[in-house]
Image: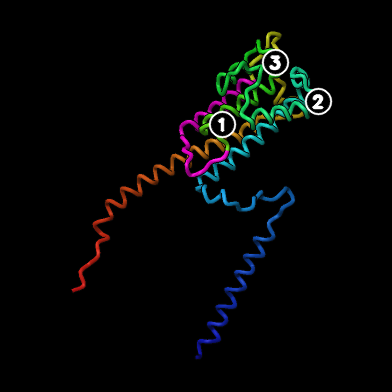
Amino acid sequence: MRHLPMAVAVIAMGGVVMCAGCASYQDAPVDRGKVRSTSMTTADLAQTDINRMATLGMRANLESLYLLADKLYKRNPREWRKGGAATQADAMSQLRAAIEGRRTLTDLKDLRDVRALSLSLDPAFGGDRVAAFVFSLSDTIIAAHGGTTVFYLSDGLDAQRIYNAARNVEIAAWLLASRRDMAGKPLLLANEIADVRNVSFEREFGKVIGRLDLLAEMLDEKYRRAGIGYVQNLLGAQFLQFLPVR
């Protein structure tokens, strides 16, 4: 019974530490926004952790591409007018509908993924280059994910295809920054390094590339760990036999 006060003190101290930890966690600053979260649905039960990560990554990548399109339209307003839209907002709505409806653009002549991307970066291309470029980038990424944007247990993802998509985004960003039209001008005004340094386009491309690379690495690790686990089970089986007791 003499040790009872000491035990009470230890428990109380543990409670204080836990509360302090909770307070510290709750005090995390949210001045620049909060982590986005969604409510659980029955569809979540049909998703593995990798499926969910791929779904969230796809959603974030498409949002990055929409942001790039909006920025490019603002710097190149002549482009959205080529498509016959009344306003830039209308052009953005049409682009979103094409991407999410998996419909190709007339200017791209029914080409998809990397072939459409090559056409959008052709100096001779005369259509809405912003829409063509962003649509073909999105189509390249979606094609690398098996042609879908939401992933479930029945969906297979290929790490190498997603890795290749990341490299294609890198190449596209480099070509956009370096390629010139017939008059020697940039195909599209994007990054600018002058009196005021503007590399917001490069930063957004980097986010897309980083997400794709992380998913590819996670997929590769998943299958690698599954193989290692199988071998470990084989090797360890002989040490996990029940021992005789009589």
Q: Are marks 3 and 1 in contact (CB under 8 Å)?
A: no
Q: Is residue 111 visible?
A: yes
Residue 195: in sight, yes or no? no
Q: Residue furthest bottom?
A: 1
Which label number is shown at residue 185? none
Instruction: Give the residue drawn at x 73%, y 29%.
Output: 92
Residue farthest right in this picture: 86
Give the residue at mark 2.
Answer: 87
Give the main secondary structure of the magenta stretch.
helix
Is 169 placed left or right of 218 in the picture? Answer: right
Q: Is residue 43 above or below residue 177?
A: below
Answer with the quarter of the image where residue 5 lies. bottom right
Q: Residue 202 or 242: which is nearer the viewer?
A: 242
Q: Circle 3 sits on which residue? A: 127
What is the residue that sits farthest to the left in this orientation?
246
Q: Whole-percent x and y of residue 229? A: 35, 49
Task: Say which label, 2 or 3, has the lower sequence index.
Answer: 2
Q: Earlier in the sequence, mark 1 or mark 2?
A: 2
Helix, strand or loop for disc 2: loop
